[in-house]
Amino acid sequence: MAVERTLVFLKPDAVMRGLVGPILNRLEARGFTFVAMKLLHVSKELAEKHYAIHKGKPFYDGLVRYVQSGPVVACVLEGEDAIAGCRRLMGATDPRKGAPGEIRFDYAQEIGRNLVHGSDGPQTAATEIALWFKPDELVTYRRAGHEWVHEKA
Ligand code: IDP
Ligand code: MG
């Protein structure tokens, strides 16, 4: 397992519904480290670049509108296996197909309002982090208690 960085953002429904704290807490409590964090309105350009892979799919236009429909909280998280680990915490893309304990299952009901994004692989993570954050917005530090999360710290 490698130390990875992943791009996570809380979509407008998470911010508008007051779920920023509970969702970030799930990621933080597992032991991942916030390397960057900001609140922003997503521009059309950023929305289209971020979701370029889905262009042409039936849900694309709605998705690009959804992500611009209110503020989002964008983060970079770091940790062992952080890319897959964060996605497992988020759960199934369609909340209805998930299970209790998953963020999307616990707090959401529909695929088009599924609260949170997480990069899906090392290459996507690198591309997405560079798209959302400038290098000087990334802050490197070691969380207190690292040795209480990692046996071989
Ligand atoms: P992921 O977010 O779990 O990686 P993707 O397949 O990459 O899922 O889809 C990106 C986002 O597009 C989803 O999180 C969801 O917001 C939206 N989406 C995907 N499929 C549908 C759909 O069938 N209807 C509405 N929105 C969808
Ligand atoms: Mg995806």
Image (cartoon, helix red, strand yellow):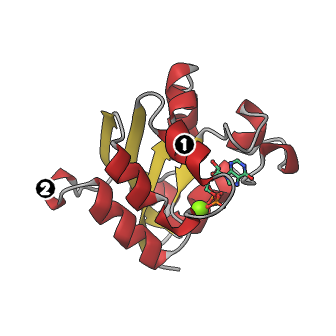
* Alpha carbons under labels 2 and 1: distance apart: 26 Å
- Residues at circles 2 and 1 in contact by the CB criterion of under 8 Å: no
- Mark 2 or mark 1: which comes first in sequence? 1
**Residue 136's mark?**
2
At a point 72% along the width and 53% down the height, the residue shown is 93
> Does residue 76 appear left or right of residue 118 in this picture?
left
Specify whether residue 9 is in view. Answer: yes
Numbered label tally = 2
Viewer-proximal residue among 128 and 32 = 128
The residue identified by callout 1 is 29
Q: Is 79 placed left or right of 112 in the picture?
A: left
Left or right? Give the position of 119 relative to 109.
left
The one nearer the camera, 104 or 66, is 66
> What residue lies at 13% left-to-right and 56% top-to-bottom?
136
Secondary structure found at label 1? helix
Which numbered circle lies on residue 127? none
10 relative to 56, above or below: above
Callout 1: 10 Å neighbours few (<14), some, many (20+)? few
Residue 94 location in percent, x, y? 77, 49
Determine which quarter of the picture holds residue 109.
top right
Compared with residue 123, is residue 92 higher up or lower down, i.e. above or below?
Answer: above
User: In terms of depth relative to the viewer, which is nearer, 32 or 64?
Assistant: 64
Identified by mark 2, the residue type is Asp
Image-quadrant location for residue 39: top left
Q: Where is residue 61 in the image (x, y as percent from the top left)?
A: 57, 48
Q: What residue type is labelled 1?
A: Ala
Residue 102 in picture, x, y percent from top left: 74, 45
